[in-house]
Structure formats: structure tokens, C-alpha cells
Image (cartoon, rainbow, N blue to C red):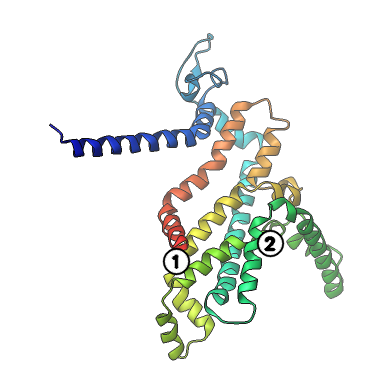
Amino acid sequence: MFKSKELNRLVTMALQYASLMAFGLFTMFPLLWAVSFGLSSDGSYAYLFPQSFVPHVSGGDGTYSIGTTLVWFERVFVEIPFSTYFKNSVIITTLAVVGTVVISVLAAYPLARMRFAGRNFIFVAIIATLMLPQETALVPNYITIVKLGNFADWLQLTLTGSDAATWKKLIGMNSYLGVVLPGIAGAFGIFLMKQAFEAVPQDLIDAARVDGATEMQILWRVMLPVTTPSIAALAIFTLVNQWNEYIWSSIVMRAKTMQPLAVGVFNDLTGPLSGSQNTLMAAIVLTVIPVLVFFAFTQRFFISGMDGAVK
């Protein structure tokens, strides 16, 4: 027989696990539905509950049975330039992750460990930008990117005498840097790294300074190794956000061959291919899978890094 205290503990634990499982299923609801939809031979069962959560295939005589098909996933690669979109997303996300980590580390270190006039004011001004919605920066960023492209065009003509406008393609509209640059100096990354640097014991920095290390050597050889979890968390957070980013990418990337997955797949499958809902769901699943796999292998760095930042 269970004692009353032991029984209460088991009931409490059972309720906690049941609540977590229910929340997990609720969170996974859209993805499970999309996977089932993409693996079914047609959309006849897509809006039936709970049949829509089990893939079905047609028997050819109007009957359906439980089963899966990959025909819609194959059609994604045939009907839209999915590989091109995927390559663009990888390039843009890699540039965004590297740029954000470098800028955040270089900006956070002096704010956390160096004393200079106006340090607190600068930090508050940076944090204040978190209160602004993303849409307020669209017009200034658009004008900036256009002018940067025009400046690169003028610089190429002045220095080389060529009017080929190839330099403009590196930093202006329809360029990878045009998508990445406005977001790499984000307040969240600077705040996260500042909190991580402030948690490093002062004795380590003093010992390095006594040994004659410069500030950049302290940053590279002392601070970065002990704040690796926070850097990894920032990289993962940036990767997920940039991979799924749509609004700014759709403004800058007007050429179809330069568009990332979020923009290209949405435009193709809500336009001429909007009638193929199974293809749409298969494309959505293929778009999400890389982020899920990456997060599954790096979640422990993300959790430990965010935990250190909160402390």
C-alpha cells in the first residue's frame, strides 16, 4: 500500500507529465498535421479529425487506407527551384550568424568590462531599440541599402572605370549582404553577450592584464572560451530567426534566383501552384526540417547559454 505522502507525489508527477505531454502535442499540432498532409496521396482526409493526423493513400477505387507516399515531396523539387532557395537560405543564414556573433561580442565586451564616459547611456539606448517593432526600421533600412548599392556602383565606376555595376550586386538590392546587414547589430545579441561577459570573474581579467595581455587578447583568449555556451545560444537564436525571416528578405530579394526558402516557397506555392495543397505542406515540412535537426543537436548549448544570460 502506498503511503499518503508517496501517493500525492506520484499523482503530482503524473499530472505534471500529462500537462507537459498535452502542451507538447498542442505545440506540435500544426507540424504533425502538415507532415500527415504531405504524406497522404490527396487532401480528402486533411480536414477530418482525427483522420487527418494519419497519412492515407488512395486505393484507386475511391477507397483510402492508412499509408504514406513521397510523391508530393518529389514534386517540390520538380515544380519549384527548391535547391536554389535552400542554397540561398544557407548562405544568408551563415552570413547572419557570423556577423551577429562578431558584432555582438565586439560591442558587448567594452560595455561589460571597460570604463568610459557614457557607457550606461549607450547601453540603455541600445536596449531601447528592443521596444521598437521591426516594421519601423523597414523604410530607413530600404533607403540605406539602395544608397549603399548606388555608392558601390559609383565607387566601381570611379576606381575601375567600369560601369558593369557588379559591385552593386554585392551590397545593394538583390544581394546577400543587403538582407543580412540591417540585422547583425541587434540589441538582443549585445545584451546576451554583455550578461555573459559580466559573469566572468574579475580575477581572470586582472591576471591576464598583469601578464601584459592587451584588451583584444583578453577578449580572444580569456573571455570567449568561458562564454562559449552564450555564443552558441546566440548563434542558434540567430540561425532560427534568419532562416524563418520573411518580410525584409521579400523586400530586398526581388530576383527569384536570389530568394531564400521562406520567400521563394511562399511565393511559388501561394501563386501558380496554390491549388496543390499537398505540395504546399510537403514544401513547408522540408523547409522546417533543417532547423529542427540543427536545434535537436544543439539544444543543450542553447539552454545553458540562455540560463547563464538570465542569471
The quarter of the displayed image where residue 172 is located: bottom right
Q: Is residue 299 left or right of residue 91?
A: left
SS of the residue under disc 1: helix
**Where in the figure is residue 274, as x and y percent of width and height?**
69, 29
**Where in the figure is residue 122, as x and y percent of width and height?**
65, 72
Which of 84/39 is in front? Answer: 39
Q: Dividing the image into 4 quarters, which one contains the N terminus?
A: top left
Label 1 Cα neighbours within 10 Å, binned few <14 / some 14-19 / many ≥20: some
Q: Is residue 255 left or right of residue 115?
A: right
Do residues under tags 2 and 1 come within 8 Å of each other at their CB atoms?
A: no
SS of the residue under disc 2: helix
**Distance between mark 2 and mark 1 Cα atoms:** 24 Å
**Where in the figure is residue 243, as x and y percent of width and height?**
59, 49
Residue at image coords 61%, 59% = 96
Which of 11/282 is in front? Answer: 11
On screen, 251 above or below 52?
below
Residue at image coords 57%, 41% = 287
Residue 198's disc number? none
Which of 170/219 is in front? Answer: 219
Residue 228's disc number? 1
The amino acid type found where label 2 is placed reads: Leu
Q: Dividing the image into 4 quarters, which one contains the C terminus?
A: bottom left
Label 2 Cα neighbours within 10 Å, binned few <14 / some 14-19 / many ≥20: some
**Where in the figure is residue 104, as x and y percent of width and height?**
58, 67
Q: Which residue is mark 2?
A: 181
The amino acid type found where label 1 is placed reads: Thr
State the residue lying farthest toward the front: 4
Q: Is residue 284 left or right of residue 163?
A: left
Q: Earlier in the sequence, mark 2 or mark 1?
A: 2
On screen, 220 above or below 143?
below
Residue at image coords 55%, 70% = 105
